[in-house]
Image (cartoon, rainbow, N blue to C red):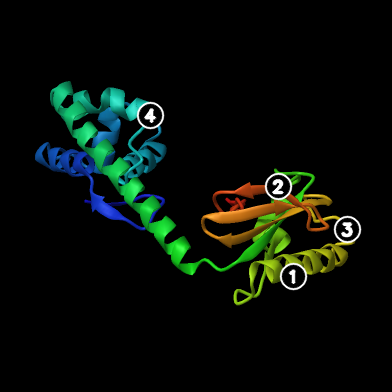
Amino acid sequence: MPVTRNFSVQFESAIGGFVEKRRKALELSRSGVVKRLGFKNLSKGCKRYDAFLGGHIEQPFILQNLAAALDVDVDVIQATLETTRCAISDAEKQAEADAEAAWRRSFRPHGIIETEKSIPEPIFIAALMGTEKLKRIELDDTAQDAALLEQMIVRTRDHMAEWNGSIPAFGKATGIVVNYTPDKAVRYDLEGNFRERLTSAVRLGSARIRFR
C-alpha cells in the first residue's frame, strides 16, 4: 500500500502490505486485529494501527505484539520491518536531495539579519509571523557584491526601524549576513565591516504551530 511520509515521495510499504494481507487471510476486521494486538481502547488502537500502516512503524507496543497477533514467526516480521525501514530511509534521502536541488535552482542573493536571540522567544510569535518575514532581506540579484552589501546595510536599517529597533521574538540586530550564492556567504557587522567568510549560505529555520 502507498505510504506518504513528511515528504512528497511515495513507495510501497513492505510491512503495511504484509500486515494487511495477513489480516485478510485470517479473516480479521481492523478492530479484530487491534484486539489481538492488545489494545483495550479500540478507537485509539485503530488510529495507531492506521498510522502504522501509513508508515509510522516505530510503535513499540504494536511491534512487540504484531507477530503473535498475526500468528507468524517473529523473524518474518523483523525481516519485513527491515525492508520497510530501508525504503523509508532511501525515500527520505531522495527527498532531501530533491529539496536541496530545488533550493539551489530557486536561489537568489539575499540577506539575513542576525539577532540577539538565535532561537525565537516566544516561539509562537515567529511561527505566526514567519521567520523569513522577520529576518530575511530581499536584494537586487542583478547587483555586484559591493552593491549587495550596501543594499543590505540600508535595508536592514529600514527593516529595524519598522520594528522600532527590535524584531519580535528575536530582539535587536547584532550583525548581517549576505548570501551571495548557495556556496558563498559573508558575515558583517551592522556597519558592513567584514567578520567572517562562510562556505555556504545561511538558512533560516522555521517554526510551526499545530491546532488540535
Callout 2–callout 3 Cβ contact below 8 Å: no
Q: Is residue 199 left or right of residue 102?
A: right
Q: Nearer the viewer, residue 56 or 179?
A: 179
Label 4 Cα crowd, 10 Å radius (few <14 / some 14-19 / many 20+): few
State the residue position of label 2: 123
Expressed as whole percent of the image width and height from the top left, the position of residue 87 reads 25, 43
User: Residue 131: which disc?
Assistant: none
Q: Is residue 185 left or right of residue 66?
A: right
State the residue position of label 3: 165
Label 2 Cα crowd, 10 Å radius (few <14 / some 14-19 / many 20+): some
Compute the Cα span from label 2 to label 4: 37 Å
Compute the Cα span from label 1 to label 4: 63 Å
The residue located at (65%, 60%) in the rendering is: 132
The label nearer to you, 1 versus 3, is: 1
State the residue position of label 1: 151
Compute the Cα span from label 2 to label 3: 19 Å
Compute the Cα span from label 1 to label 2: 29 Å
Count of residue discs: 4
Q: Amino acid at mark 3?
A: Gly
Q: Is there any visible trace of residue 212 in the rendered image?
A: yes
State the residue position of label 4: 40
Is the residue 71 above or below the residue 55 in the image? above
The earlier-in-sequence mark between 1 and 2 is 2
Compute the Cα span from label 4 to label 3: 56 Å
